[in-house]
Amino acid sequence: MGLATGAQGYWQQHVSYEIDVTLDHTTHRYTGKQVLTYTNHSPDVLTHVYYHLYYNAFRPESAMDVRSRWIADPDPRVSGRIHELKPEEQGYLHALSLKHDGKPVRFEENETILEVHLDKPIPPGGKAIFEMTFEGQVPLQIRRSGRTNAEGSDYSMSQWYPKLCEYDNRGWHPNPYIGREFHGVWGDFEVNITIDRSYTIGATGLLQNAAEIGKGFETPGMKMKLPAGQHLTWRWKANQVHDFVWGADPDYVHETMQVPNGPMLHFFYQNDPAYAENWKQLKEKTTKAFEDLSKRFGQYPYPQY
């Protein structure tokens, strides 16, 4: 995504993320490095940029917590629950260091928003490279993201990384996280996830090192080269998307089914014999649904789902 040609004067910003993250499943904490290439397609000079730090909402006295306890019609998933989280159950996400085009820049964390003061503005049509180190803790799942959810999955990882805020013809959108999110910049992602080798991961995009991972991603005749050690690094790549999410569990069954003239479907589910037949039927029904959708609305634009 970038400049659109169908509407005169229309523009979109563009991001390219390179993220390396390591998750410790015993503490539910992770550390990471991120290189973000940001292209300013707007007609404006940018003197600041902003990031979302969504996991900071999952701490007592956060804006989301306070709102959930005082508004008239709170989200029942949230109301009062954040306030009761123990320190090891809370979430957080912090930038540890940040450079703009190789030079350190000032940044300020205001709960779920990181404000970055640029010493060198980004001109119209210009590019900027931001290098960040960060750390986080995965919260007990209360809303869409977190760990140890009611369905039995260890990790449901959405909104887990420092995510650049959207800038459009209305300006920046550094909206604090109090209940709504997901307004993001379209772009490309290369994400390397290092985790205990007992885990199976499903994620946005295409796995680049199936021969080192296996776990149902290998293809017939593929020469496997599984690395030694207690951890595996999963290398993912996704183009023209506005976010990167992933899920992980040591008990996942991973199965696939190819849609004729369509995407490869990947299914990840808990290894429970009571539901095996349901998942078998879901694979067939999902394939038929994709075939019908392709006829009615056009081809699905990505190679896998």
Image: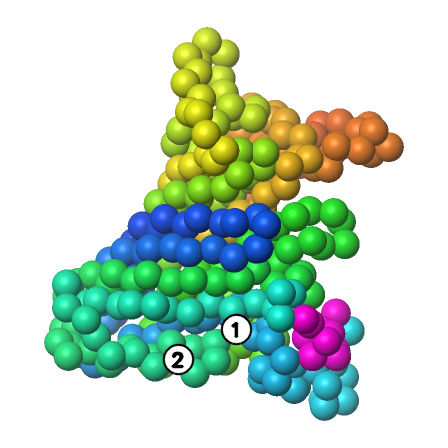
Query: What's the magenta region?
Result: 77-86
Q: Residues within 10 Å of mark 2 (few under 14, many from 20)?
A: some
Rendered location of residue 114, percent (x, y)? 38, 76
Return the residue at label 2.
Answer: 109
Question: Looking at the image, which residue is at 72% across and 76% down?
Answer: 84
Quarter assignment of residue 133: bottom left
Determine whether, in the image, residue 288 is placed left or right of residue 216. right
Tag 2–tag 1 contact (CB < 8 Å) = yes
Q: Nearer the viewer, residue 137 or 46?
A: 137
Q: Nearer the viewer, residue 139 or 245?
A: 139
Determine whether, in the image, residue 24 is placed left or right of residue 238. right
Q: Amino acid at mark 2?
A: Glu
Secondary element under disc 2, as helix, strand or loop, is strand
Residue 169 shows in the view? no
Question: Looking at the image, which residue is at 48% across and 36% down?
Answer: 231
Residue 305 sits inside the magenta stretch: no
Q: Residues within 10 Å of mark 1 (few under 14, many from 20)?
A: many
Quarter assignment of residue 223: top left
Residue 176 shows in the view? yes
Q: Amino acid at mark 1?
A: Asn
Q: Main SS of the magenta segment?
A: loop
Rendered location of residue 40, percent (x, y)? 22, 67
Question: Looking at the image, which residue is at 29% across and 68% down?
Answer: 97
The outermost residue toward the top is 221
C-alpha separation, residue under disc 2 versus residue under disc 1? 10 Å
Return the residue at label 1.
Answer: 56
